[in-house]
Image (cartoon, helix red, strand yellow):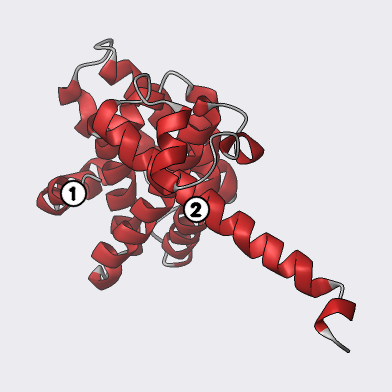
Amino acid sequence: MSTSEDPTAPSGRVARRQRRNRDALIRAAGAVMTEKGIDAATMLEIAERADVGAGTVYNYFKSKDELAVAVLEEMMHDLAVEIEEITVGFEDPAQVYAFGVRTVLHTATTDLSWKQMLYRSEVIADALFRRMGPFAIRDLRRAAQAGRFQVPDAELVWRLTAHAIVGVSLAITTESVPPGAKDEIVVRLLCMTGIGADAATDLAAHLPIDQIAKNPR
């Protein structure tokens, strides 16, 4: 069959081009929004940085806000991969999960890109659940299998945790909750795993905070 007769060839090329354009727009938006902030960034500037037509950006994202969410989702996935790389040598699966929770809370309250989007808490919480979920849910299940956590429904626990992290991060950035409460917040989030307050406190107290601080993303 010739290329012209292959119905999948054109669509394959189109799909690849669309993927490249979308990826380029997300990268460009991330760079521009980091430099200038979400409010000051313009779709025209982002399109120019991505080397696509000014109108092309709207073929992929309906608004700058939607594009900002896409940027943050990619950052969430990158953070999940970074946490996995840092914790690869951890022997306790419960510590792996706890480290991830503490790192996400730290990032959400210190990284400008995250902080700028927290006002859309419901959208961001859903994005956090979806993008970091495969990693967090896996870690919850491993800790439960090791007898460290009591988690009959790991997906539900992570959903509750994701929403709680976003909500309390917004409270911290708006100064409704003091930043110094982060350690206590982590303990309460870990209590959702069924380990009890004392065990959660001990687990949180032995996290390598220095590694979290060096990898804020």
User: Mark 2 is on which residue type?
Assistant: Asp
Image location (x, y in percent) of residue 157: 52, 42
* Secondary structure of residue under mark 1: helix
Q: Left or right of 136: which side holds 209?
A: left
Question: Which label sits in the foreground, 2 or 1?
Answer: 2
**In the foreground, 166 or 18:** 18
Binning the other alpha carbons within 10 Å of mark 1 as few (below 14), some (14 to 19) or many (20 upward) gives some
Up-down relation of residue 191 to residue 173 (above or below): below
Confirm or deny contact between disc 2 and disc 1 (CB under 8 A): no
User: Mark 1 is on which residue type?
Assistant: Ile
Q: Dot 2 corresponds to which residue?
A: 23
Q: Dot 1 corresponds to which residue?
A: 212
Task: Please report the residue visible at 77 percent of the width from the left and 65 percent of the height from the top.
Answer: 11
Q: Please tell me in which quadrant of the rendered image residue 12 appears.
A: bottom right
Task: Please report the residue visible at 9 percent of the width from the left and 50 percent of the height from the top.
Answer: 210
Task: Please report the residue visible at 52 percent of the width from the left and 57 percent of the height from the top.
Answer: 134
Image location (x, y in percent) of residue 76: 41, 46
Task: Please report the residue visible at 14 percent of the width from the left and 45 percent of the height from the top.
Answer: 213
Q: Left or right of 80: which side holds 73?
A: right
Binning the other alpha carbons within 10 Å of mark 2 as few (below 14), some (14 to 19) or many (20 upward) gives some
Instruction: State the separation of the CA atoms marked 2 and 1.
Output: 28 Å
Q: Left or right of 157: which side holds 147?
A: left
